[in-house]
Amino acid sequence: MSDSLNYIRFWGVRGSYPAPFGSHMRVGGNTSCVEIRADDHILVCDGGSGIIPLGNSLMAQQDIKELMIIITHYHWDHISGLPFFVPAFVPGWKIHISAPGDIEEIKNRVSNQMVSPYFPVEVEMWMADINYVMAQDSKLEYGPFKIETFNVHHPGSTYGYRIQVHGKTIVYVSDNELSFIDRTIEERRDELDPEEWQLINAMQMEERIKALETIEDAHVFIHDAQYTPEDYNKKRGWGHSCFVDTVEFAADANVKQLYLFHVDPNYNDNKIEDLHRQSLELLHKRQSSMQCRVAREGLTVDLDSL
């Protein structure tokens, strides 16, 4: 754990499925899970396989027995660790869970993966105090954390989260296709007359400006960087971004630190480090001062130093 009481720690950084391969260990193989600690409050972003080692770590301490988990969406790589999250099975723990939908939907979506014949233990075996929480007017609060939800481009209802704590802004967007609208417009180009084309372009610009405002001046931006340009061209519409789009978007929004996240499980460490080198070259050409890093399992960011 970090010596600081205020930090971000990456427990899972892969997209789609766990990749526990020797060629992937410098970056890490677990799926999405990020811990944010402020004083004695813990906020957990997503419950992918990375939440399993986080839970084991929490069981080794006695100071904190309560936390909140915010889930971006219900795809398996974001909830598959919850059935193995040890604190949920221990009396005396209190766990708040928030995700897209109303309270009943959140409860059902989380519990439905833990039913026969898919899993031997149901959520009724969770002995912790489980509290399902719905965002009110796109807002949540937990201890010192003020959280705002916003919709992103990914199949199904999917949230991004803008988190403010101790005067710092962290934006967490695990799954998002930044060029989704560009693709949709391009597919319909032949159907549009000049006036419609002008209107669509204006809407496209308005959408981009709104998206940039959501992350503008963020101290930390954790964002989907799943594909190379070549792979993205093969998988347009799958709900994930090319790392180049992610870097350009973050720099346009004057983000202070970008973390390339949700990387493709087929990419080994060497390939991801090459993508990082290309990202730094792109920022150098732009004369951007933004810091860009690969989100690595175990990496800890001191909030107080941001």
Image (spheres, rainbow, N blue to C red):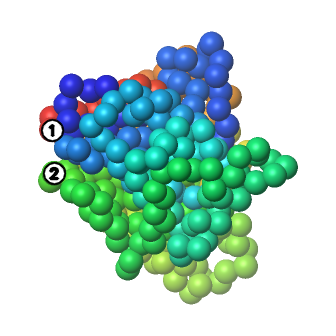
Count of marks overlaid on the render: 2
Q: Residue at x 30, y 50 (%)?
A: 170
Q: Are marks 1 and 2 in contact (CB under 8 Å)?
A: yes
Instruction: Give, as a three-letter code, the residue at label 2.
Output: His
> Where is mark 1, residue-wise?
304
| 190 sits to left or right of 302 | right
* Residue 18 pos. (x, y %): 65, 32
Q: Measured along the vertical axis of the image, is residue 177 above or below residue 288?
A: below
Q: Secondary structure at mark 2?
A: loop
The front one of 47 and 265 is: 47
Residue 105, compared with residue 298, is above or below; it is: below
Q: CA distance from mark 1 to mark 2?
A: 8 Å
Location of the N terminus (image quadrant): top left
Q: Within the image, what quadrant is residue 285 found in?
A: top left
Q: Earlier in the sequence, mark 1 or mark 2?
A: 2
Q: Residue at 27% x, 48% y: name it.
A: 41
Q: Which residue is mark 2?
A: 166
Is residue 278 in sight in this rendering?
no
Asked if residue 301 lies left or right of residue 114, the reply is: left
Location of residue 112 in the rendering, given as x and y in whole percent from the top left corner? 71, 59
Q: Could you say which disc has been placed on residue 184 in the image?
A: none
Which corner quadrant holds the C terminus? Answer: top left
Q: Residue at x 16, y 51 (%)?
A: 166
